[in-house]
Image (spheres, grey):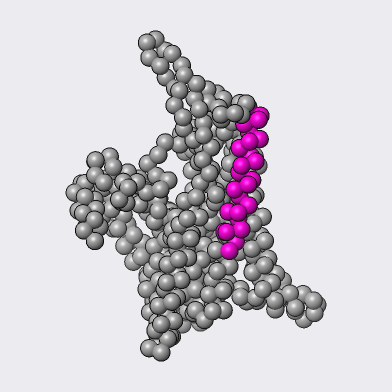
């Protein structure tokens, strides 16, 4: 405990770090306050508080702003969608590939295109949001005027959230966009924890404690998955320039076991709503499709979880393939005079990196699939559905990833000021080390 208070004191004594933390907290408070401001022209008492399926997932990311019809009802999700589209275009279209290779100027162009695309996505999603989730009896003004005003306000709210995220990244601590999603998820944890404890009562106190212990070990396993890397050693040839010798040191390429992050789960969950929707739509016309809709109606059904796990494994390989290019890594190493000991530079190095990436992606994808379906097993075991979402899936992975990234930045400040790190060893595993890629 003394070590903990000493670390807090050291963090607070670094003026720059203290200011960044306070700025971050201030922006997060503004974001949370905005999620409680209801769109003008709506009677909040007539809003439906129950959201399920994909809408329920969005509501979890937005900390309840989606179901409250808040001015931040779309939150940062349109920007995430635009970023995913642009990222896929950088793989498919040479124009975007060229911009990506232009360095800082190319990055600014891609950012600007992403912002413009976000506005168009906001306008389209705001119409679907108003028509699909807000009951007509909750609207107390003319519906046409409300639709126009809500589109403008929701789009402005998303742009403001995007601005908050960028300001947190520039002037605060951690990645701003990820921080906004994480704070939305965490904001629901206290209420779900209290609801879970109340549902168990005094007679189920021991069971509730066991659930908390199980959640702790699940978090530990997710941290291990997020941090796991396969290090490929890289040796650089010595170069003599004048009277000085450069190079000759050994570094490494850290290939993450879960290079794709949460994206495979997001893609898979987006597709998992199609069987149920098609089954319900054709329920009266085709008995087979009706049975499919019934089988995929619940996320605890065996068919749902088997298909979800399969899609996650497939998308993990797909997303890893489009985000990590072994050929480019090998070419960069060769250009800088680096080589993997025992492997010829060039094509053989690319094939070697690709083979290792394939070997570590398979267990990583299986583990990721297990994490994704853990909430279903938690519900079957008797955990309430709201609290079960914290046992795995996208929510837990985002929280763990953002918290670890923030701790990394805080530890970097401590080590630069010659303080001890967050751990007794002075370093958090996987941090503050030199890497090639």
Q: Quadrant of residue 275?
A: bottom right
Residue 41: image x %, image y %? Answer: 43, 74
Q: Nearer the viewer, residue 265 or 369?
A: 369
Split into 4 quadrants, where in the image is the N terminus? Answer: bottom left
Residue that appears at 37% across and 10% down: 243
Residue 100 in the image: above or below residue 77: above
Q: Nearer the viewer, residue 315 or 150?
A: 315
* Residue 256 in the figure: left or right of residue 302: left
Seen as rendered, the residue at the extreme bottom is: 203
Residue 405: image x %, image y %? Answer: 40, 51
Residue that appears at 40% across and 39% down: 433
In the rendered structure, which segment of residues is drawn in magenta?
346-370
For the image shown, how many numbered marks are present on the structure?
A: 0
Residue 212 in the image: above or below residue 353: below
Residue 26 in the image: above or below residue 240: below
Q: Is residue 401 visible?
A: yes
Q: Is residue 156 visible?
A: no
Residue 314: image x %, image y %? Answer: 67, 55
In the rendered structure, does residue 79 fall within the stretch colored magenta? Answer: no
Residue 332 in the image: above or below residue 211: above
Q: Nearer the viewer, residue 95 or 340?
A: 340
Residue 42: image x %, image y %? Answer: 44, 76
Task: Look at the magenta stretch and give its main secondary structure.
Answer: helix
């Amino acid at each position: 405990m003394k070590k903990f208070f000493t670390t807090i004191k050291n963090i607070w004594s670094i003026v720059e770090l203290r200011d960044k933390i306070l700025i971050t907290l201030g922006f997060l408070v503004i974001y949370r306050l905005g999620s409680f401001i209801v769109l003008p022209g709506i009677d909040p008492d007539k809003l439906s508080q129950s959201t399920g399926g994909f809408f329920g997932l969005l509501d979890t990311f937005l900390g309840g702003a989606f179901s409250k019809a808040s001015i931040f009802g779309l939150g940062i999700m349109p920007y995430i969608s635009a970023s995913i589209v642009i990222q896929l275009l950088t793989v498919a279209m040479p124009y975007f590939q060229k911009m990506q290779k232009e360095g800082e100027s190319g990055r600014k162009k891609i950012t600007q295109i992403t912002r413009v695309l976000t506005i168009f996505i906001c306008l389209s999603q705001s119409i679907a949001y108003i028509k699909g989730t807000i009951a007509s009896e909750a609207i107390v003004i003319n519906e046409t005027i409300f639709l126009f005003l809500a589109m403008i306000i929701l789009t402005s709210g998303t742009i403001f959230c995007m601005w908050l995220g960028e300001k947190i990244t520039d002037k605060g601590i951690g990645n701003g966009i990820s921080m906004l999603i994480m704070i939305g998820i965490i904001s629901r944890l206290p209420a779900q924890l209290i609801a879970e404890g109340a549902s168990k009562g005094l007679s189920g106190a021991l069971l509730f404690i066991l659930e908390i212990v199980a959640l702790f070990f699940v978090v530990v396993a997710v941290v291990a998955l997020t941090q796991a890397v396969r290090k490929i050693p890289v040796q650089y040839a010595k170069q003599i320039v004048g009277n000085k010798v450069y190079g000759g040191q050994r570094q490494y390429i850290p290939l993450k076991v879960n290079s794709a992050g949460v994206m495979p789960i997001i893609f898979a969950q987006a597709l998992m709503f199609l069987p149920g929707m098609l089954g319900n739509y054709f329920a009266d016309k085709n008995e087979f499709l009706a049975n499919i809709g019934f089988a995929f109606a619940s996320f605890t059904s065996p068919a749902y979880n088997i298909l979800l796990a399969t899609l996650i494994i497939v998308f993990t390989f797909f997303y890893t393939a489009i985000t990590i290019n072994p050929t480019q890594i090998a070419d960069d190493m060769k250009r800088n005079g680096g080589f993997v000991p025992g492997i010829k530079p060039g094509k053989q190095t690319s094939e070697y990196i690709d083979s290792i990436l394939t070997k570590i992606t398979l267990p990583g994808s299986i583990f990721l699939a297990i994490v994704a379906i853990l909430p279903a097993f938690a519900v079957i075991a008797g955990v309430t559905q709201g609290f079960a979402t914290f046992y795995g899936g996208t929510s837990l992975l985002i929280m763990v990833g953002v918290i670890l990234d923030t701790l990394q930045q805080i530890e970097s400040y401590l080590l630069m000021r010659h303080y001890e790190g967050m751990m007794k060893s002075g370093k958090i595993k996987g941090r503050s080390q030199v890497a090639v890629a």
